[in-house]
Image (cartoon, rainbow, N blue to C red):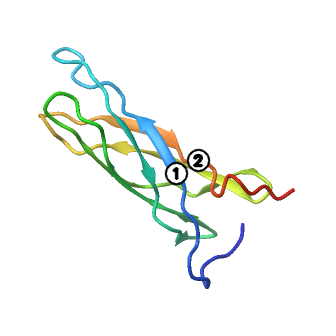
Amino acid sequence: MEDNSNRGQTHVHEFEGSTFIAEEEEEPHNHRFAGVTSEVIPFGDSHVHEVSTNTDFFEDHHHEVGVRTGPAIPVGPNKHVHFVYGKTTVEDRHFHKFVFATQIEDPLVWDD
């Protein structure tokens, strides 16, 4: 993994996801969300990113998604993704769980 700690700008990841269904008995629904992570946050021999965004609306509410990714997971030569899971904020007396993986950083460059 490349060490970007002494350089200016590092990298970010795009992400998109859906929450699990909540309010299964009263008003079953889920939400969608998308965005771009923060830059690199050093974490041991790896790094993580912050994820902060809002979900879409369902009738009268939306939720906030705020979590830190897991460390980098290699997926090819000099490429990686991050696993992410957590819970949204509580709105309208409920929250949603979510699980997703970030997209590959810098997807247009492939180093063999």
Residue picked out by circle 1: 14
Q: In this view of the protein, which residue sits in the foreground, 8 or 100? A: 8
Marker disc for residue 53: none
Residue picked out by circle 2: 103
Q: Residue at x 18, y 33 (%)?
A: 94
Reading the chain from its start, which is encountered first: label 1 or label 2?
Answer: 1
Mark 1 residue type: Glu
Q: 80 left or right of 76?
A: left
Mark 2 residue type: Gln
Q: Residue at x 67, y 75 (%)?
A: 3
Which image quarter: residue 68? bottom left
Per the image, label 1 sits on a secondary structure element best described as strand
Compared to 50, does 32 lie above or below?
above
The reply to whether the C-beta atoms of the residues labelled 1 and 2 are less than 8 Å apart is: yes
For label 1, the crowd category at 10 Å Cα-Cα, with few meaning under 14, some 14 to 19 and many 20 or more, is some
Q: Residue at x 61, y 51 (%)?
A: 81
Q: Position of residue 2 (x, y in %)?
A: 71, 71
